[in-house]
Image (spheres, coloured by chain):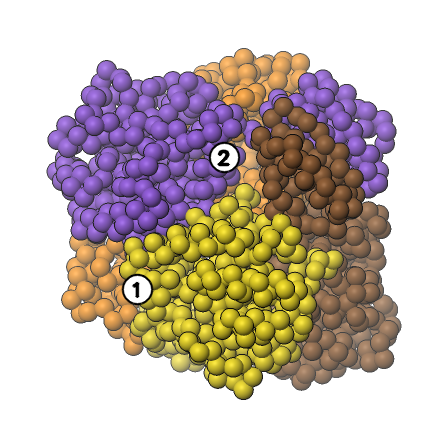
Chain colours: A brown, B yellow, C orange, D purple
Amino acid sequence: MIVVLRHGCSKAEVQHVEKHLKELGFEPHTLWGVERTVIAAIGDDRVTTKEHLESVPGVERVMPILAPYKLASRELIPRTSEMPLGGPGPEVKPVANLVKIGGKKIAVIAGPCSVEDRGMILETAAAVKAAGACALRAGAFKPRTSPYQFQGLAEEGLEYLAEAREQTGLPIVTEVLTPADVPLVAKYADCLQVGTRNMQNFLLLRACGEIDRPILLKRGMSATIDEYLLAAEYILSGGNKKVLLCERGIRTFEQYVRNTFALAAIPALQEKTHLPVLADPSHGTGVRRFVAPMAKASVACGADGLLIEVHPDPEKAKTDGQQTLDFKEFAKLMQDMKAIAAAVDRSI
Amino acid sequence: MIVVLRHGCSKAEVQHVEKHLKELGFEPHTLWGVERTVIAAIGDDRVTTKEHLESVPGVERVMPILAPYKLASRELIPRTSEMPLGGPGPEVKPVANLVKIGGKKIAVIAGPCSVEDRGMILETAAAVKAAGACALRAGAFKPRTSPYQFQGLAEEGLEYLAEAREQTGLPIVTEVLTPADVPLVAKYADCLQVGTRNMQNFLLLRACGEIDRPILLKRGMSATIDEYLLAAEYILSGGNKKVLLCERGIRTFEQYVRNTFALAAIPALQEKTHLPVLADPSHGTGVRRFVAPMAKASVACGADGLLIEVHPDPEKAKTDGQQTLDFKEFAKLMQDMKAIAAAVDRSI
Amino acid sequence: MIVVLRHGCSKAEVQHVEKHLKELGFEPHTLWGVERTVIAAIGDDRVTTKEHLESVPGVERVMPILAPYKLASRELIPRTSEMPLGGPGPEVKPVANLVKIGGKKIAVIAGPCSVEDRGMILETAAAVKAAGACALRAGAFKPRTSPYQFQGLAEEGLEYLAEAREQTGLPIVTEVLTPADVPLVAKYADCLQVGTRNMQNFLLLRACGEIDRPILLKRGMSATIDEYLLAAEYILSGGNKKVLLCERGIRTFEQYVRNTFALAAIPALQEKTHLPVLADPSHGTGVRRFVAPMAKASVACGADGLLIEVHPDPEKAKTDGQQTLDFKEFAKLMQDMKAIAAAVDRSI
Amino acid sequence: MIVVLRHGCSKAEVQHVEKHLKELGFEPHTLWGVERTVIAAIGDDRVTTKEHLESVPGVERVMPILAPYKLASRELIPRTSEMPLGGPGPEVKPVANLVKIGGKKIAVIAGPCSVEDRGMILETAAAVKAAGACALRAGAFKPRTSPYQFQGLAEEGLEYLAEAREQTGLPIVTEVLTPADVPLVAKYADCLQVGTRNMQNFLLLRACGEIDRPILLKRGMSATIDEYLLAAEYILSGGNKKVLLCERGIRTFEQYVRNTFALAAIPALQEKTHLPVLADPSHGTGVRRFVAPMAKASVACGADGLLIEVHPDPEKAKTDGQQTLDFKEFAKLMQDMKAIAAAVDRSI
């Protein structure tokens, strides 16, 4: 850590800070400049926090040198880790052709926002498979902004999803909202999604760290990169090494879209972590007309996968219809993305 | 709702939208302008969502007229509701002089970020009481950005808090992180806090709606006013009518503070809801030197209460020391705030 | 406009608002709902402002129906306007093969952030031409955050740029900072750039509206889409019909990049305006390593052109070296973008 | 500066960076850590930029130690500088009781957004003086978002302002939009305002640096503290030592207010600079009902002055009526603020 001392701080204050740093296990190197004294504290930045040291008298500012996460870091594993979409658990049956994310093939995960009934989910599963999707995603437990909105079919929805997997062979991705539901969802799903509102639901992250299923952890809508990778670190440090990341739009002053799709986060994350990074242009924009251009942009800038909302009749969708493609639009987009993928030396 | 149709949309599209609105229970009034056709849909905006209608062909934009929340609305109760800080449960003993929030007296709730050990919490309870605080706040379950940081003492911390109430008579405010812990925390606490990261943890909100304790619901760090009041609505619609709100800083491009303290949210919330509105200048700024000026500003602009972090030795605090006052600073601030409160015709 | 009246406003207040709207030339249609009265005011929204009407007693909120700009609107010209990069002025010599922006061919405009000396600009011009760029961009007048930084070569820089055009045939794009300099810059440049910090320098926009040269108007770093198109409207309404837009990153809470590159603004702008829309991945990210992926993403999502910073030796660049490509990186990127352009049925 | 090198960078790269730093005049101290090598570069941070050094191979990140501004810094003058509101120029007549800003007395500057005609400005000047304001503020040159809006009376407006000064003795504060107008505005005004959209109009700042009138420089709506103080530095480094700062709201995701009033910027600026810091609760919120509470909050947190919009009939105002007080509201607010000022040991 670099500890910048206040302008004009006394020698006693400097010594007090040095002592404090030594007690924390750092080796302090004090550099006396004309306008500022700076202490370079050699050691593991993660034993303390920037904020803690900034409460020590005489300290103006603390600048960490090292990233606060370890297991998620690309310094630990200097290439993208390939993650299988599925686990060896007793309940989830092995999928014949195991889907992997993080390699040359870009994974397209598609499906409706919510499981609304048996018919629509089976119909959608068949359609997205035919168009080339590698996994089915739909929500049985729905986090909704208002208590008066549709909250999902719960376990009934999970059963329909399992049936869709049975029929199509597509692995299932679905959201879990609370630690108590992790075992239930893991019984049905190949991959559990932790949504944007739960990115810092730390007890849920811990519960996800204890199972053997890949976790699709979406970026919080105002999360920094460090906060995001620390959330992944909660899962990884619990023992579950399979975490997928996903940029899904951040909250900014912009109002013509539901979120600002921060696509540069994709190369930025890929530089800092070995975890695969997906893009969700449906939530990333919140506007159906922008899903296709931003899906193509996601492929062009190197996303390892995409999440795309597809519904038999978006106008009738119970949730998120305004950002959902119909089957024809999705099939067309898949074709268009294949051409882009080829241009960046990947496939879909 | 006002439904704006696309430039040049056909008569058939207009009729389709009208039919759709009637099916939802609205009475559509179509106004044919030169550049745009607009349908004023009279009825309850809350039966559908803006987003749903925007997925109907021919629709450009939907503008709701009514607020999406009901029970939190100041139209329901046209004055600030006074909320007792404590409940009638079998475990929490009745506090002799029941503290109420939302009246002329401004409630100051103070204490350390975390319960670190028995001694420090008893010492702090005594000190904040002596300085005039009306309740003690400290965390036993801590949501921490990194898995490598101190995570709180859990039930042991709750026991120390109960002892502090025993000794001082101050009601206890403490955070709950997950639905499964609600009964445990409610056994010890007079008021449960739902933190900023859990503002949209909807299952936690539902669990809080089922108990008879006031809930201090902090604003999410990127929550709009509507999202915030809908989160309160989850608790209220579950049957628990005691919700306290608290502005605690939002995430913006500013970096010289941990958060941007959006104080105008206080009069803005008071205009829209009958729930009392507190201010947290400690988290709202994240910088100890700015806590006192912003606490005074909070009183001046009409906050119904304050949350202030106080610790016997902030430099040694395990969490949030950089934004925490020591006893002397807190006592001085209490004096200063009393003068401001008098100037706005209130008391502390 | 839709005028929403306050809950419980009196009949006299409603009549007062109706009268006020009639005086402004609107035809008011009052709709009496149970919870709110709403007046649909038919007429030209642009004769007044939302803010003005919100100051009328009894009014809660005003929602405009029409966009506040006219000449920039895609409703006026329902396709992308092709803009020549150059004008017929007496000083700027006609470029043999006139470059046009807004058609199937994607325009790549490249060059260093600043003209630093004669040699480097001639060298860069030759290199970007060889790689396939269609225009040269470099600054002679530099807006710099600090008064202690390099401020540009001024007219000397313009002369070197003219020489570069002479040698390569590439049209020149360069920034103008103040109304008084518009004639001078127009004497040398084929296209004048108005930078992000000047997007709402309205007198500069007016001065640009009076000349016959295309204006490359960059988006302000916290400008909404409406504000941006109104800035274009200043130029268009002055009589200059040649305006090019450019997304260059917005200011958000994100810190791992200099700006958040809001790529969805490209399809969003193309839907609202007939003006061509470019992308600037150099400023849009501020990080050299992210320029190539985001340039490719820009092509994939439909940008009509790109602005890319290129320098013979970025490490030695006087300005913006951290986001600048060298010749080899640029040549490689041009090749890669050609493949993407083909995949979206365009060319470079 | 602290230069953090990339993980695993070579010894040759370290030496290259050391050499580069020496050439820039720094004395490099290299610290070899286990995970990162860090170079502490002792010298004046302002000779280069963070961005420049980040383009040197092997460099991961650069962290400046010193603030990039000098003349604006509180390290130069360790107390708030008192600034007279008026200059010794030949045209502006000396005001009998010279108003000073930056001392114990809090300056309230009030008036309409625009000078609309002679009558209203004389009437408003008399009213704000009667209520206790110390200066009159109104715009003759108006920066307007749309070219179709009222653009101000220009010199005619300045003449009315001069007449208002004649009648009331109040010094005049008015906005200047472009360098060419600085002499004209300085002929009439005691203090020139540079508005939020022009905070980085560097040629305007330079022109303001060459006159002998105080400059009221408003914070840009997405300006960081460093950018803001560097804008002040442009004026100060030109020789004009009289600069007043003003927080006026920033752009964030919040939509219930026109801007987010970032009041903590007041103590934050006061800690970093000796220039007086004002608050503008009218623009800071954009909502009339919030002006009074936020004005009181501004006094409570230590603002050296306030800017408040006042108009004889806000409903009829040509600009900004929705955030403007009438005479009665302003007189009431002045009384209320006096009580708060007394509580923080100041006066109005």
| Residue B61 place in picture, x, y as percent | 43, 62
- Viewer-nearest residue: A124 or A266: A266
Q: Is residue C153 visible?
A: yes
Chain on which label 2 sits:
D
Badge 1 local density, few (<14 within 10 Å), some, or many (20+)? many
Q: Is residue C255 above or below residue B48?
A: above
Residue bearing the label numbered 1? C4
Chain on which label 1 sits:
C
| Residue A126 place in picture, x, y as percent | 72, 74
- Viewer-nearest residue: A67 or C89: A67
- Viewer-nearest residue: B121 or C79: B121
**Residue A256 appears left or right of D204:** right
| Residue D96 place in picture, x, y as percent | 18, 25
| Residue mark closest to the camera, 2 vs 1 | 2
Which disc is residue C73 wearing? none
Q: Is residue A9 above or below residue A214?
A: above
**Residue B246 appears left or right of A259:** left
- Among the 4 quarters of the image, the one containing residue C171: top right
Distance of mark 2 from mark 1, alpha carbons? 45 Å
Secondary structure at badge 2 equals: helix
Residue bearing the label numbered 2? D272
Quarter of the image with the N terminus of chain C in it? bottom left
**Residue A123 appears left or right of C171:** right
